[in-house]
Amino acid sequence: MNGLLASLVAAGMSTFGIFAMALFSQWAQRNSAYCSAFAVGLLTVGVLFHLIPEAASLSPVAFSWVAAGFAAMVLIGIAVQTAVSRRPEGAALTFGYASIIGLSAHSFLDGAVYAASFQEEAFTGWLATGGLLFHEFPEGVIAYALLAQAGLPRTRAIVLAFTAAAVTTVAGTIVAQSLFSLAAEPPIAAMLGAAAGALIYVLIVHLGPHATGTPNKRGYDIAMIGVAVGTVALILQQIGQLH
């Protein structure tokens, strides 16, 4: 249930980004990078100091699953870039639809990551996906911007952006949880490792570059706040386990 709850929160944040962009485009564009910067810090701590060590403690081949999760995201990214680069010159609508399809696939995988991250325990899930949640706001902003730039009317752009950035995330969680429930003994280490690999890709390809858009390099300060929050959460969790 925690994975589904996380995906619903993520969908809500994406929806907030969509409507913020539709109604207050300048404000949304100015502040979305701060969300990405905070997510970079929080997610880095969660992946490097909790998710990967947790997977490694369960299986000696956990790092193979980390590599597999990262490689899968790279291949999907290449496929999307290839589809977009082959669009007819000047076909903004084709570019918009191709980009939104790629974003939908990415959001669906985000939903699967939420499901996988909560297979071990609630703390692992919330720490691993906490940073991911903060990237949902800029994802909603980007989804609407792509469709608006493609020339779609506002209502249609909102509906398609909501479907691509919010609905697909919840669908990915539901599908993944259904598949996990069919397994007599879910491969926890594999799921945690693959989720970590996918999140590393999100950090490098999506969150990092977007976070650099903060004015006066304030993104570094915001990222450090994310690191501090993630570190405090880890310390409190360890103290809780000792008691």
Image (cartoon, rainbow, N blue to C red):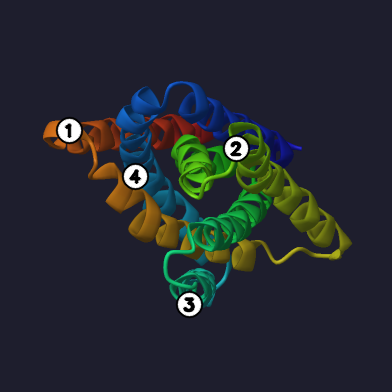
Residue bearing the label numbered 2: 153
Residue linked to disc 3: 86
| Label 4 CA crowd tier, 10 Å (few <14, some 14–19, many 20+) | many
Label 3: element kind: loop
Could you say which disc has been placed on residue 51 in the image? Answer: none
Crowding at label 2, few (<14), some or many (≥20) Cα neighbours within 10 Å? Answer: few
Residue 152: x %, y % from top left:
58, 43
Q: Point out the frontmost of discs 2 and 4.
A: 2
Mark 4 falls on what kind of element?
helix
Residue 9 higher or lower than 213, as above or below: above
Measured Cα–Cα span from mark 1 to mark 2: 31 Å
Q: Earlier in the sequence, mark 4 or mark 3?
A: 4
Residue position marked by numbered label 4 in the rendering: 40
Asked if marks 1 and 2 touch (Cβ < 8 Å), the reply is: no
Identified at 65% across, 50% down, the residue is 111
Label 1: which residue?
215
Nearest to the eye among marks 1 and 3: give it: 3
Q: Quarter-wise, where is residue 97 in the image?
A: bottom right
Q: Could you tell me residue 46's position as x and y percent?
A: 43, 46
Q: Earlier in the sequence, mark 1 or mark 2?
A: 2
Question: Which residue is pictured at 17% across the width and 33% down the height?
Answer: 215
Q: Is residue 55 visible?
A: yes
Q: Whole-Å distance between the Cαs marked 1 and 4?
A: 16 Å
What amino acid is found at the position of numbered circle 4 in the picture? Val
Count of marks, rendered view: 4
In this rendered view, identify the residue nearer to me: 77 or 128: 77
Q: Nearer the viewer, mark 1 or mark 2?
A: 2
In this rendering, which labeled residue sits more in front, label 4 or label 3? 3
Q: Residue at x 70, y 34 (%)?
A: 5
Image quarter of the N terminus: top right
Name the residue nearer the viewer: 83 or 42: 83
